[in-house]
């Protein structure tokens, strides 16, 4: 398929695909799926080899949020039966973080529900960061505290934070249908504040909220323009008790196409497979490792993930290796960007693919290799069953057993780790 050959060549040059090319990836058929994964996988390997970075979440404050984000189990008015607790003490958070580090996590992500931190909250999180760094000097710490006010990003950086996460989540055009208590522009502003303060910006999306292919492409192109170092891709977990509880729109195949599209648009960025992977990718999770170079270890904020050991076994069995703290995650040209390099944004940012860096770079600074031409593909099927496997009527006992159907039984509310007396999953 000429499309995949073109996308691989652009990915190796860090050149922006066109919007039509990105949309075409999402429109490929299930028969073409392995070819899409192989093509995007060659771009992933060019910039990140076979390394997988492990991240570990610590939920500093759960529930009790005044914002009305429809996807969130911690939202205002949520009836989801999640853990609810106020701020963990710095020593409690440090202990929780240590479990993830012991399991192989290179980055600890400190998350707190709420619109945004007060100055007192920033002080509290700063003490937590210091406590974690005292015990694990090499670990990266990323804060995720909501919308930032002026000067707060700088204070977190001074306390030892390495990164700040604030996701765009969906396209600007559809943002108002998802959240009304803050705006898309508010989110962009916080990512820019983090960047300006010298923090590594982390910003991504949530797929599966009923958005169109165009919405997915729009948000990923907006992320490319913001140029975060890390792009987490979440797949909606439709919690009972939230407005999106019935939005079961994803199949494993759809998830892989989305991840491939993100990799082609953001070839040299840390693409992180985040919440919902166990629920929606299920047994195809190992294939996703050919597209992403980063995952969360163990549990998430309010839901349980698969066992930490299972994550490590999956990485090893798929032929990948856990990235150590002595390894720099990003390619050299991105780490040098602050000193005048071009970072990842080559092209004019409007989807035309025009412009670019003076020299095509590679992960080791050598000449970009000529990509192998992908094998010919089977033409896209017009059979509706190819995009909706559940339509084949192969029901053998409920939705959990329907081929490709939703697995509501895989949504498990977190009852262990931070905020409980039970050991964390790491």
Image (cartoon, helix red, strand yellow):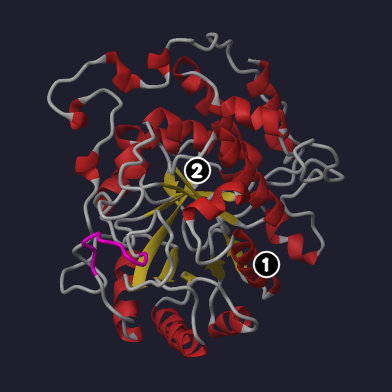
Question: In the rendered view of the protein, which quadrant contains the C terminus?
Answer: bottom left
SS at badge 1: helix
- Separation of residues labelled 2 and 1 (CA atoms): 24 Å
In screen coordinates, is 148 left or right of 71?
right
Q: Is residue 129 above or below residue 352?
A: below
Q: Which of 146 and 265 is in front in this view?
A: 146
Give the mark nearest the N terminus, 2 or 1: 1
**Circle 2 residue:** 292
76 is within the stretch colored magenta: yes
Q: Nearer the viewer, residue 85 or 155?
A: 85
Q: Residue 414 placed where, x, y %?
A: 23, 60
* Majority secondary structure in the magenta region: loop
Question: In the rendered view of the protein, which quadrant contains the N terminus?
Answer: top right
Q: What stretch is highlighted in magenta?
A: 75-83
Q: Residue furthest left?
A: 397
367 is within the stretch colored magenta: no
Mark 1 residue crowding within 10 angstroms, few (<14) / some (14–19) / many (20+): some
Of circles 2 and 1, the one toward us is 1
Identity of the residue drawn at 33% across and 58% down: 300
Say the numbered circle drawn on residue 192: 1
Q: Residue 422 placed where, x, y %?
A: 16, 69
Q: Residue 81 placed where, x, y %?
A: 21, 62
Say the numbered circle drawn on residue 376: none
Q: Would residue 408 be seen by someone viewing this image from the given angle?
A: yes
In screen coordinates, is 394 left or right of 212?
left
Q: Would residue 169 be seen by someone viewing this image from the given angle?
A: no
């Amino acid at each position: 398929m000429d499309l995949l050959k073109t996308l691989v060549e652009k990915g190796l040059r860090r050149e922006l695909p066109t919007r039509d090319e990105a949309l075409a990836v999402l429109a490929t058929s299930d028969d073409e799926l392995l070819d899409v994964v192989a093509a995007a996988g060659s771009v992933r390997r060019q910039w990140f080899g076979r390394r997988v970075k492990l991240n570990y979440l610590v939920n500093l404050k759960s529930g009790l949020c005044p914002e009305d984000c429809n996807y969130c189990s911690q939202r205002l008015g949520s009836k989801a039966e999640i853990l609810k607790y106020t701020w963990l003490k710095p020593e409690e958070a440090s202990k929780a973080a240590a479990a993830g580090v012991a399991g192989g996590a290179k980055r600890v992500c400190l998350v707190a529900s709420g619109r945004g931190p007060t100055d007192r909250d920033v002080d509290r999180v700063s003490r937590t960061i210091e406590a974690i760094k005292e015990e694990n000097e090499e670990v990266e710490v990323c804060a995720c505290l909501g919308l930032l006010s002026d000067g707060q990003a700088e204070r977190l950086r001074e306390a030892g934070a390495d990164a700040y996460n604030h996701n765009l989540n969906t396209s600007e055009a559809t943002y108002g249908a998802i959240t009304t208590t803050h705006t898309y522009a508010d989110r962009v502003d916080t990512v820019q504040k983090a960047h300006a303060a010298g923090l590594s910006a982390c910003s991504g999306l949530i797929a599966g909220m009923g958005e169109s292919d165009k919405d997915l492409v729009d948000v990923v192109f907006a992320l490319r323009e913001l140029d975060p170092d890390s792009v987490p891709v979440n797949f909606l977990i439709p919690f009972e008790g939230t407005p999106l509880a019935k939005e079961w729109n994803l199949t494993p195949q759809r998830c892989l196409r989305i991840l491939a599209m993100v990799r082609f648009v953001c070839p040299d960025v840390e693409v992180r497979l985040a919440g919902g992977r166990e629920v929606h990718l299920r047994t195809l999770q190992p294939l996703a490792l050919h597209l992403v170079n980063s995952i969360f270890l163990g549990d998430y904020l309010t839901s349980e993930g698969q066992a930490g050991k299972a994550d490590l076994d999956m990485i090893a069995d798929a032929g990948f290796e856990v990235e150590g703290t002595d390894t720099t995650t990003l390619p050299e040209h991105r780490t040098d960007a602050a000193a005048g390099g071009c970072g990842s944004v080559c092209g004019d940012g409007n989807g035309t693919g025009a412009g670019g860096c003076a020299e095509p770079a590679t992960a080791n600074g050598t000449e970009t290799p000529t990509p192998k031409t992908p094998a010919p593909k089977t033409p896209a099927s017009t059979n509706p069953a190819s995009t909706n496997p559940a339509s084949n009527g192969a029901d053998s006992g409920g939705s959990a057993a329907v081929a490709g159907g939703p697995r509501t039984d895989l949504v498990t509310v977190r009852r262990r780790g931070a905020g409980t007396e039970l050991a964390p999953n790491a």
